[in-house]
Image (cartoon, rainbow, N blue to C red):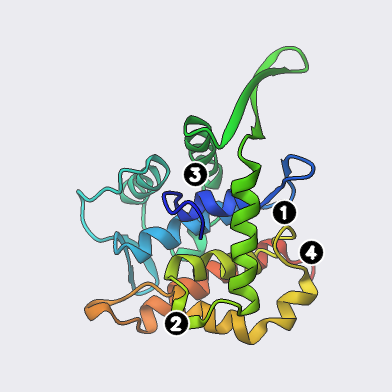
Amino acid sequence: MPDGSLSLPARLYLLAWDTTRNEPTGTPHLDHLVRAGALTELAQRGLLVDDDGIATPADLDSATGNAALDGLLELVRESRPHHWRSWVPLHARVTLDAVREQLAAEGYLRAEKRRALGVFPTVEYALERGAVADALRAEARRVLEGSAPTVAVSDRDAAVVTLAAAAELRTLLTRTERGQYRERLAELAKLAEPAGPGGVAGPGTRRVGEELRAALTSAVAPAGA
C-alpha cells in the first residue's frame, strides 16, 4: 500500500477518514479497530506471541521504534495476562491517542487545541494529507476486490482489509460487500496470520487473527444480535 512507513494501526486510522467531510466517520469503534491493528502488527513482527490464547510478550527488551506500538507492548508487559480478544477494548483509547499524536507529528494530521464548553482543554484533529488516505483506500479496494493477486498481497495489507471488514468500516466497504467478498476475505485472513515457529502459521497464530476479528465484529453488532 502507499506510504510504507505507516504502521498498520496508522493505516487503519487514516482509512477511517471520510475525506469529503474531513472527519473519521468509518466506524464508531475506531479505538477498537486501531488497537486490533496494533496487536496484529506486534504479532506479525513476533513481538507478541500466543501462549494458550494469551497475548504474551516474546521478551522483555524488544522495541519497534514506533511510539504507539511500543506503548502497547509495554502496557502488555506491565499488565496481568489477558486473551487477545480482551486486549482489543482494554484501554484502547491509549493506543488511538498515541497513533493520532504520531500522525500529527509527521504531518498527516493537524492538531487544533480548543476548549470544550469554553473551559476544558481538548485537541481536535483535521486531515492534512487527504491524498494519502484516498490512496490507502484505493489500494485496499484493489486488495479486497482481487485486482491484486493473492500471492502479491503482503501480510500487512491483508490485515488492513480483513480488520476493516470485521469492523464494517464504511469508508472501505458496505455490509453487503462484506458478504459478497466472503471467500476473498477468508483468503486474505490466512495471509494476515502471524508466522509461528519456523515461519509457518499454526493453530495458535490462526487463533490470534480470529480472536481480534471476532472482537471487532462483536463491537459493531447491534445490541441483542
Q: CA distance from mark 2 to mark 1?
A: 28 Å
Earlier residue among tags 3 and 1: 1
Which residue is tagged 2? 151
Question: Disc 1 on helix, strand or loop?
Answer: loop
The residue that appears at 35% across and 49% down in the rendered structure is: 73
Looking at the picture, tell me which residue is in the foreground, 158 or 32: 158
Secondary structure of the residue carrying numbered label 4: loop
Residue that badge 3 annotates: 95
For disc 1, the neighbor class at 10 Å (few under 14, some 14 to 19, many from 20) is: many
Tag 2–tag 4 contact (CB < 8 Å):
no
Q: Secondary structure at mark 3?
A: helix
* Label number found at residue 220: none
Report, in whole angstroms, how far the alpha carbon at label 2 lies from the one at label 3: 31 Å
Distance CA(mark 2)–CA(mark 4): 38 Å
Please report contact status of discs 2 and 3: CB closer than 8 Å, yes or no.
no
Q: Nearer the viewer, mark 2 or mark 1?
A: 2
Q: Is residue 102 left or right of residue 23?
A: left
Residue occupied by mark 4? 223
30 is higher (above) or lower (below) than 139: above
